[in-house]
Amino acid sequence: MINDYMSLSTRRGFNKSLGHFRLVTSIVQQMNGGSNLAEIVDDLEKKKEVEKSQIGPILNAIVIDRMDYRTLSFNMPSDNGAFDGVCAETQRWGKLDVIVAYHHPQLGISLVNPKLKSHWESIREINREELIVLYMKASLESDRALEPDALEALRDLVMGKTPKDTSRFVGQASRPAAQPASRPAAMPSPQAAAQPAPAPSISTLAGKGQEEDAAPAPAAPAGGGKRKVTPKYSIQVTNELFHNGNVEAWKNIVESYKAKYSGLEVHIFHDGQKVNNINALFKWGKVKHGDAILFSVSGDDIKGVAKLQRYLFEGASQRYYNFLKKDVNKIITLF
């Protein structure tokens, strides 16, 4: 039988649990004062006072078990990156407190107050099949019957559809105005991940070429405590086919990038689909000359995207062989 208290048997486990309990208590106090959970967590993430692994337990303990928010979950039917309409519409819903939980396959849970444009800007885009969970609660007990219809309306908005009549949700919140998120009780901050030592670039690609000039610097990520995601950058295939050599070159490039920037993830897309395994791009004739493969990078401190784009362009060209020259069981040094 598993002992539920075993984690409390060591000083480290006890202190970690105590810090979490203090954090949850502070969040509950702020929500009782009218603050939105997504804004509170965003502030904590900025200060590095909450870990990503805590967000799920916080959601369940507070908004489900304690505060009885109603929920609705769904998978996105298609990619969507246009959320201005969601923001404009939900800003009118004064009778309801709303939280959107976006479950990113690599980044974990990100909480969004759909009434804040800055929260949507930090998300940038939600891709097809990714999980969204909506949390909703009316300010007045007499308005709780509105919650199911409001959840369905919000789902339609997030999907990019036009919802049914939402006039019933418009009104003034009865709870106190939201207060700025205060600093919670003392809690150990997570340690920053160690960065690997810098490595030199491949000399054969050191000079500037047409493709390097075309590679834009990555756009500055939107503000907020959530982990950031760059826009999708397009790589045109200039080889006659994106064959096995190109695939191996891309695998080596991405491996080298992640070795240099260990906290970052590279996401690849083709034909409207996310590519979870680069090997899936190799199917004779599947990716042809002139096709576009997209990529984005996610993480806390995004760097090296322009160089990554240049190398991926080279890897999709006839010069892919530059990225195949490496020792067995060693990572090629590019960044």
Image: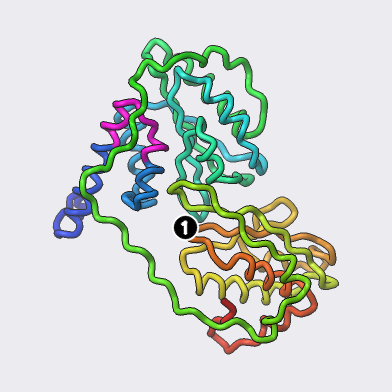
Can residue 295 be seen? yes
Q: Is residue 1 magenta?
A: no
Instruction: Work out which residue is located at the far top of the displayed protein and give it.
Output: 142
Quarter holding the C terminus? Answer: bottom right
Q: Which residue occupies 69% across, 52% down?
A: 273
Q: Quadrant of residue 41?
A: top left
- Residue 93 drawn above or below residue 245: above
**Coloration of the structure image:** rainbow
Can you identify the residue that label 1 sits on?
Answer: 300
Q: State left or right for residue 69 relative to residue 200.
A: left
Q: Kindly tell me whether residue 1 is visible in this rendering.
A: no
Q: Position of residue 184 (x, y in %)?
A: 25, 42
Question: Is 36 part of what is drawn in magenta?
Answer: yes
Please state the horizontal and vertical placement of residue 226, each as a whole percent of the image. Answer: 46, 48
Q: Amino acid at mark 1?
A: Asp
Specify the segment rendered in magenta: 27-40
Residue 105 position (above or below residue 196): above
Residue appearing at x 34%, y 26% in the figure: 34
Residue closest to the eye, 165 or 7: 165
How many badges with numbers are in the image? Answer: 1
Q: Tag 1: Cα neighbours inside 10 Å, few (<14), some, or many (≥20)?
A: few
Residue at point 30% right, 32% down? 30
Residue 222 drawn at (x, y percent): 53, 48
User: Where residue 49 sits in the image (x, y, percent)?
Assistant: 31, 50
Does residue 227 appear left or right of residue 153 in this picture?
left
Q: Main secondary structure of the magenta part?
A: helix
47 relative to 188 in the view: left or right: right
| Image-quadrant location for residue 160 | top right
Where is 104 relative to 318, above or below? above
Secondary structure at numbered mark 1? loop
